[in-house]
Image (cartoon, rainbow, N blue to C red):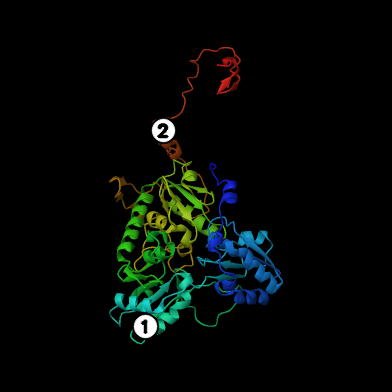
Amino acid sequence: MESTFSSPAEAALQREAGSAGLRTPLGDLDRVYELERVVGFVRDLGCQRVALQFPDQLLGDAGAVAARLEEATGSKMFVLGDTAYGSCCVDVLGAEQAGAQALVHFGPACLSPPARPLPVAFVLGQRSVALELCAKGFEAQNPDPTAPVVLLSEPACAHALEALATLLRPRYLDLLVSSPALPLPAGSLNPKPEPLERFGRRFPLAPGRCLEEYGAFYVGGSEAISDPDTDPDLSRLLLGWAPGRPFSSCCPDTGRTQDEGVRAGRLRARRRYLVERARDARVVGLLAGTLGVARHREALAHLRNLTQAAGKRSYVLALGRPTPAKLANFPEVDVFVLLACPLGTLAPQPSGSFFRPVLAPCELEAACNPAWPPPGLAPHLTHYADLLPGSPFHVPLPPPDSELWDTPDVSLITGDLRLPPAWKPSDDPGCSALTLRPPLELAESSPAASFLSSRSWKGLQPCLGQTPVTGAVSGRRGIAIAYEDEGNS
């Protein structure tokens, strides 16, 4: 049975980590897990204690990989298999608890910068790609050889993009190849100019070019997956890509392609609906879904300031991985906002669904900031760091005397008129001076109290002073199946 506010400890012990049939043959471990590169990484740093982080589907190989690395490096290896939230994020907290001096992350990764400086090596995997079939699929989706196109892929197929571009460049003149945006080591200096970094990838754009000019061709996924919406990496690309540009995907095994325009429109429509729900909400629950990604404290303070400026109440909830049973304990909350990495925010919801919608930080920004969105920005930002000061996408709140705060709005869900906030943000964020209310003005009641008063059942009636006083008597003894006074019947 699930605990009220947290996942039970027995679930982690009873969960099957990996199947013996899915383990990698011992002869392929060096190639699949790039053990030679990992050994060089450990030796260059001179680390004696190294943490190895595996997702659940790769834990079957964790023991063999750790033994190989210990034998080759002479360092102590610690396997991290119980990540607190998502396996795509670097578990720096777990590595520090083990006293590790470095961490090696295996499998799909969101490539979000960790909250604390720790040397990290990423092993994304090398999935086989049918280059000839993918090249034919590209030609079918892009008949114009002069149209600008970006080659994208899932992390495990990134190694094959340059080879695919080599097959296509004799015909296609404007082809751009993206690469995973691996975090640079702490203290390293890069003399070359930094390429554009977005969606966890780097785009080497030529001077004077912008990403909004390009279409996209994505290599990844599988035809065995019945629901393509379960791929959060592709979802964040579809949401953030320019709506007017073509976007197609290709299966790396069969070369089968499809146009993703319809799916992108469906995802954007869903996000616009969530923005409307956030505008109608009075109480917002901020879910602290990650503690290992950089700037999460700053992002949490930013979201609280947003809800306060919009006249909403916010509550911070640290529940670990959100589930419908956990969030059902807070019925007075109208919407929840998940503060997590881009892949964790767009991850598919578990079976049973949530009784209240779970939003991304960008949707709360669009609902509470009247200056959002400025012209020229992508329709959806997938990482909360893009909303913070210092980012080119940051949009500050309007000044208190701006007419944007006084603009009335109509809800597209209920049809009711949404009044402007009863108060405006203060010029001094640190001001806490009290202001006197007029004698006859009614103070605003708590949203939780208003929710309780609107319920049809409010609990047992106390009936104070109406119940006669009687002496205490002994009750029945035993268990419900056989009380002591029932005999042997």
Q: Disc 2 to disc 1, how far (Cα)?
A: 66 Å
Q: Is residue 458 above or below residue 211?
A: above
Which mark is drawn over residue 271? Answer: none
User: At x 45% / y 57%, what residue is drawn?
Assistant: 347
Label 2 or label 1, whichever comes before in sequence order: 1
Q: Nearer the viewer, residue 265 or 225?
A: 225
The answer, for residue 161, to whether it is visible in the render is yes
Estimate the x, y position of residue 92 in percent, counting from the top left. 61, 62
Which mark is drawn over residue 453? Answer: 2
Q: On the rendered image, what quadrant is the C terminus found in?
A: top right
Tag in front: 2 or 1: 1
The answer, for residue 403, to whether it is visible in the render is no
Say which amino acid is labelled 1. Answer: Leu
Q: Nearer the viewer, residue 315 or 71?
A: 71
Q: Is residue 81 above or below residue 103?
A: above
Q: Is residue 396 above or below residue 308?
A: below
212 sits left or right of 67 in the view: left
Residue placed under numbered mark 1 in the picture: 168
Estimate the x, y position of residue 386 in percent, counting from the top left. 46, 65
Q: Secondary structure at mark 2?
A: helix
Q: Is residue 269 above or below residue 101?
A: above
User: At x 36% / y 70%, what residue is drawn?
Assistant: 249
User: At x 38% / y 63%, what residue is drawn?
Assistant: 380
Say which amino acid is labelled 2. Answer: Ser
Q: Secondary structure at mark 1?
A: helix
Q: Residues within 10 Å of mark 2 (few under 14, many from 20)?
A: few
245 sits left or right of 163 in the view: left
